Amino acid sequence: MSEQGRPLNKRAIYERRRAARALAGASHDELAELWDAWENRPEVTYLRGPEAGLVMVQGRIGGTGDRFNLGEATVTRATVMLHGCGLDDGASGTSYILGSHPGHAGLAAVFDALLAVPAQHDRVLAEVIEPLERRQAERDAAAHSDARSTVVDFFTVSREHE
């Protein structure tokens, strides 16, 4: 179920995961820049947070073994409700950001809420999620290129024993 009480289909679940990944992977400055450029901004009310806490990170050896506690990680969460600017009922959005970043979590929750508004859905995808994904792909490609430049290939000659 969505936060608005409507059932989610597979496409909606995929898009929400995609958006959450892009929003969490963006920097606070990127989200602030996008929010500042957003025309006709709605009023934002915080329902929860932003507040930081700890979560237990679990791991599995080989991805299939028994779970074990790896350690704790700091996470910041926020939940907002939007009002005004053509929103009939208050749309709500939630975000969880790795680390202690209250501003980042708040802005990610705002864009998550806008994504839930049918009239804003396509705009958020086109103006926020897709540009963030492109920037993240560029950063990942640069990091991969930097890491690849340090790879050393060892060549060994084996001797045959008589």
Image (spheres, rainbow, N blue to C red):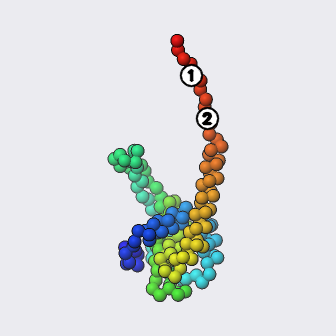
Tag 2 residue: 153
Front one among 51 and 62: 62
Q: Residue at x 50, y 75 (%)?
A: 115
Residue 79 placed where, x, y %?
A: 46, 73
Front one among 79 and 158: 158
Measured Cα–Cα span from mark 1 to mark 2? 16 Å
Residue 151 in view? yes
Q: Residue at x 34, y 47 (%)?
A: 66
Residue 36 placed where, x, y %?
A: 63, 76
Front one among 65 and 125: 125
Q: Is residue 154 above or below residue 134?
A: above
Q: Residue at x 60, y 73 (%)?
A: 127
Most extreme residue toward the top is: 162
Query: With 131 as the anchor, is 11 left or right in this view?
Result: left
Q: Amino acid at mark 2?
A: Asp
Is label 1 in contact with label 2 (beta carbons under 8 Å)?
Answer: no
Q: Earlier in the sequence, mark 1 or mark 2?
A: 2
Residue 71 placed where, x, y %?
A: 43, 50
Most extreme residue toward the left is: 66
Q: Is residue 141 above or below residue 153?
A: below
- How many neighbours does mark 1 have within 10 angstroms: few (below 14), some (14-19), or many (20 or more)? few
Q: Nearer the viewer, mark 1 or mark 2?
A: 1
Q: What SS does tag 1 mark? A: loop
Q: Quadrant of the N terminus?
A: bottom left
Q: Amino acid at mark 1?
A: Ser
Query: With 142 as the anchor, is 76 left or right in this view?
Result: left
Which mark is on residue 158? 1
- How many neighbours does mark 2 have within 10 angstroms: few (below 14), some (14-19), or many (20 or more)? few
Q: Residue at x 44, y 71 (%)?
A: 12
Which mark is on residue 45? none
Residue 29 placed where, x, y %?
A: 62, 67
